[in-house]
Image (cartoon, rainbow, N blue to C red):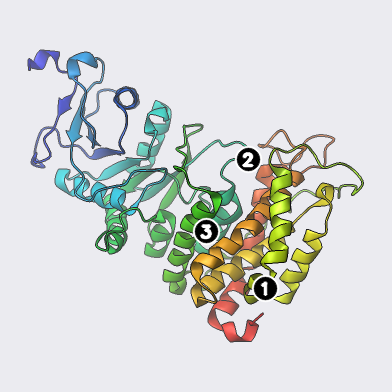
Amino acid sequence: MDPSTTDFETVPLAAPASSSAASSLLVSLCPLTVEALQTMLSNLSAAFPGESILVATPDAVPNSQSSPGLGSLHLIPYSPATPALGGWALSAADFLNTYKLMQDYKATVCLLLGPEAQSLTPDALRALAGSALVGTDLTTSSYNLGPRDGLVNSAILYPVTRALFGTRARYPLSIDLALSTRMAERLAIAAQSFTVANQNAVLLWPIAEAAAAGLSLAEVSIGSRILPQPDDADLNTLLAQVVGSFFADIDSKASFWQRARLAYFPRKQAAAPPTVPPDPSTIAPEIPGLPPMLDYFRLAYTNLHEIWSLVLPPNSLLGLKKLSQMPPASFRMSDALWVRIVYDFLLAYRLRTLNRGHLLGALTPLYLAWVASHLLMTSNSVQPDNDVQPGNTAITPKAHIEALAIAFETDKPYLVSRWRWPDRFNP
């Protein structure tokens, strides 16, 4: 090919580290369609004009003559050493393959971008890379989501991670990350324990890994992007996959998060804005999917009460009984009750109080009860970036999630006590 017509360079996988294509920044991509890859390369070129950037892709690279204006991107088409199954989140195989690429090309910083990465703007890509290039070991992304999106994250992943690991990163399962070499190595070591057992699709928890290793963390807001959805997974399956992995990771790091550190105790913050209890005689707001969630919870209260009694103490069971009798308009689960439910299920997971699959299945209707309560509590809020709207006492989704996170932080001593002396607190 005539070099004068080449807008980007394709680098063979065996290229030596001293190659002219070597760069301190590597971008590792998940599989993309031809059109999506073209868009991704254009966005990278706009984000890093004139800079030499390595771009590793498992896809066939486009012809440079048909893709003008891509600057000095150096493409690395490669076959992953550890097969990745793809999907909606980054997996163990993705982290292991990325670290091997960083080693091969002596890259000091890597952007590991998840599925649908072509929807990331040049500004978002530049912000992620900029955080890592100034020395941050792990940079995660925060996303602009709707009030009904990412509720597993809001209900469990974010507040529990914040309470136990002392971090404020909003999305523990962020699919767009910037990694230093030592962070990538740490994640690769964690990933290898799964890939050697042919569990390539297992989820990893980068924030917990960074916190346990004492590495630096940062978060950048990248606005909106297309977020991939799980393929044909019902809520029971998805919740069991995510929460099971999350609980297992917490169990493996118990010696770290139990240590008393000042940073782990809740900081003094303004309390959540008060809400006016709804009039039970009023009609519940028209919220799509609300009646089935309430019906599912009430049916589960009848059918799963015996299982819940093996996990939850009497006070929590009493709270659930009252909840099951509430009319839709006044259906509210207190933050304190939800915190104890999650912590007690985490303890039951650790102690194997019952089969873990059955345990996580029994959590699903309780999670849906929390979702219903959260949606009802915030149903009159239309400005999620403000705490309270003028003339309206409804709490916003953002304010409620922050109040919930504080509740998890405040009740952390309960979890630590039961973790260390479980027999003293048997339900």
Give the amino acid at mark 3.
Thr
Instruction: Say if mark 1 contacts mark 3, CB within 8 Å.
Output: no
User: Which residue: 34% across, 53% down?
Assistant: 201
Of 335 and 280, the residue lying toward us: 280
Under circle 3, the secondary element is helix
Q: Is residue 355 left or right of residue 36?
A: right
Give the amino acid at mark 1.
Glu
Give the amino acid at mark 2.
Arg
Crowd around label 3: few <14 · some 14–19 · many ≥20 (10 Å): many
* Distance in Å between CA atoms under marks 2 and 3: 21 Å
Marks 2, 3: nearer the viewer: 2
Marks 2, 1: nearer the viewer: 1
Q: Which residue is mark 1?
A: 306
User: Which residue: 89% across, 43% down?
Assistant: 282
Q: Which residue is mark 3?
A: 161
Residue 280, given in percent of the width and then of the height, sits at: 89, 49
Marks 1, 3: nearer the viewer: 1
Q: Is residue 13 visible?
A: yes
User: Which residue: 57% across, 56% down?
Assistant: 156
Under circle 1, the secondary element is helix
Q: Is residue 122 above or below residue 233?
A: above
Instruction: Say if mark 2 contacts mark 3, CB within 8 Å.
Output: no
Under circle 2, the secondary element is loop
Q: Is residue 270 visible?
A: no
Residue 148 is tagged as: 2
- Say which label, 1 or 3, has the lower sequence index: 3
- Say which label, 2 or 3, has the lower sequence index: 2
Residue 301, given in percent of the width and then of the height, sits at: 72, 63
